[in-house]
Amino acid sequence: MARKTSTMSGTGGRTAALFLFPFFAVFAVAMIAPVVYSLVLSFYAQQKSGLGFGGAKTSFVGLENYVQVFQSETFTGGLGRLALYCLIYIPCMVGGAVVFALLLDATVARARKLFQLLVFLPHAVPGVIAALIWAYLYTPGVSPLVQALQSGGIQLNFLDAHLVLPSIVNIAVWEWTGYNVIILFTALQAVPREILEAARVDGAGEIRAALSIKFPLILPALSVIILFTVIGTLQLFTEPSIISKATASVTSTWVPNLWAYDAAFNRHNLNQAAAASIIIALLAAGLSLAVTRFSSRMNKA
Amino acid sequence: MITETVSAPSRPSAGVARRKHDDGSRPGGKRPGGNRLSREGGFASAFTVNALLVLGCAYMVLPVLWLFFAATKDTADLYGTPAYSLGRFAFVENIAAVIGQDGGIFFRWMGNSVLYAGFGAVLGGLVSVMAGYAFDKFQFRGKKAWFGFVLLGVLIPNTATVLPMYLLASVFGITNTVWAILIPVLCNPFGVYLARVYSSSYVPDETLEAARVDGAGPVRSFFSLGLPMMMPGFITIALFQFVGAWNNFMLPLVMLQDQQLLPVSVGISIWQGYSVPQPEFSPMVITASLLSVIPLLIAFIMLQRFWKSGLTAGSVK
């Protein structure tokens, strides 16, 4: 052991730098520099000269852009919508994945390989296409879903202002549940079979074993899933922007990412777009840090 | 609490289990006593479990299946026949419509997607694997801090950096060029994290030590020993990177204005915009969607082993 560290440290520094350089070069160019530049940009504003010609001049405005972003009702509305989206999406998706993985791990389950493949299928469908498929499945006249509900006497418009949020949640649930089922199922397979056998001998039924033995043992995997799900939900952009073409219920500023896009390309206010992007990135970093903290405490307890 | 009682004293319970099963030779993946359990659980619970699994899978599969059915119909049948039935077989016409639309640009878009995703997979995968290998095998100053940067990169959502990237790229005048896509797809912090896990589980330190004694430098031993040993991991990381780049929507949407440079994801979203006011475009858009998904579906089915191992490695700490 001591020998290993000494030989490795002999090759250390310079070689490591050689191996790490490509990644950190790309990382600097594609992540650090853009964020730093946006940070700078977010403290400036383009101000038009009084007469409206002679071009705009750039001046330092401090936190003015951030204040404007937070004062914008469309931005805070979008933030609220995103929070609501998280509140519906995370329990549905994670809960669904846990239940499905436990079912798949039940001793009586058949054809596990096939079920795994089928449940993972939606993940092979790109987000754009997934949103497009569901956009059709929500459209009256094409949709078998709407038709089936109608024949049961239920009139639902999945794309109206009230239902469009749950409808988009459903798209995300469809895309991500299977992916997480596979992760959880793999974690379940690692649960020592002797323990389950012992529990069975002690008279615990299948459901009891699932809840009081298997579930606690997959908590670490579950916390990783929740972390990545939280990060993922803040990315929400593709699905609403595809759905927005099919319905007016999704506005051009529906969630923060759309708001920032709209600021840059429709309102041509790059400084505000930069400020909004920084806010989203900080929010994501803060949230994922909180989840990491919480889950490490949960796993220790 | 439960975790403790379960994980620590697993020995006595293992003893019980073994006494029950006097033959120690059970096949690897199969679980002991499965048959007996199912008999005890009874027909009802076996039926319930499998019925629920079928129901869950139906939810996953039916929308994809809809795409297959819809791609074979013309506009009238799309709106006029039940979704999961066959109308007049118009698949060939629909493909012809896809090919004919906007001067055959669809295949250009597919080619662009293959280029962007393939480049990201091969070169980006290599970049990630090299970095992950270095984090696992070399000792150097500030290792923890550098790895902290990698983790930070994992935690920041992609879309949050897309607009900043656009703003910076426009300073250098590289928006609306392939570089605006090709450089960002190389950056995959999660790939580095995965590669570190793979390196520590696939490449034994002893092998590298032996190579060192034989006089191989660290670069040579990486390419002739480390990389081949990590090949399954490399393929997994490359696969994930390919899928990520293929699915990327916001980055190309923001960066590219030239239709000739678009990947298929953005291209189809533009066509979808046509089909909303003019439903007669729908069969063409649906067929194009199907054509763009088929390569990915095939890749996923063929490479099952790799994505499963990637998901597993990603969730262990």
Image (cartoon, rainbow, N blue to C red):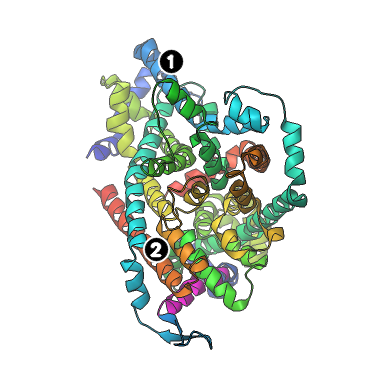
Using the image, tell me which numbered label, if any, was put on residue A280.
Answer: 2
* One can see residue B153 in this view: no
Q: Is residue A206 magenta?
A: no
For the residue marked with disc 2, what is the amino acid?
Answer: Ile
Image location of residue B52, percent across then percent down: 42, 23
- Mark 2: which secondary structure? helix
Between disc 1 and disc 2, the foreground one is 2
Q: Is residue B138 above or below residue A165?
A: below
Q: Residue at x 45, y 65 (%)?
A: B147
Label 1 and label 2: CA atoms lie apart by 52 Å
In front of the other: B221 or A157? A157
Instruction: Give the residues drawn in magenta, as a range.
Output: A26-43
Read off the residue under disc 1.
B35
Image location of residue B232, percent across then percent down: 61, 47
In front of the other: B203 or B109? B109
Among all residues in the image, which is located at the extreme left?
Answer: B1
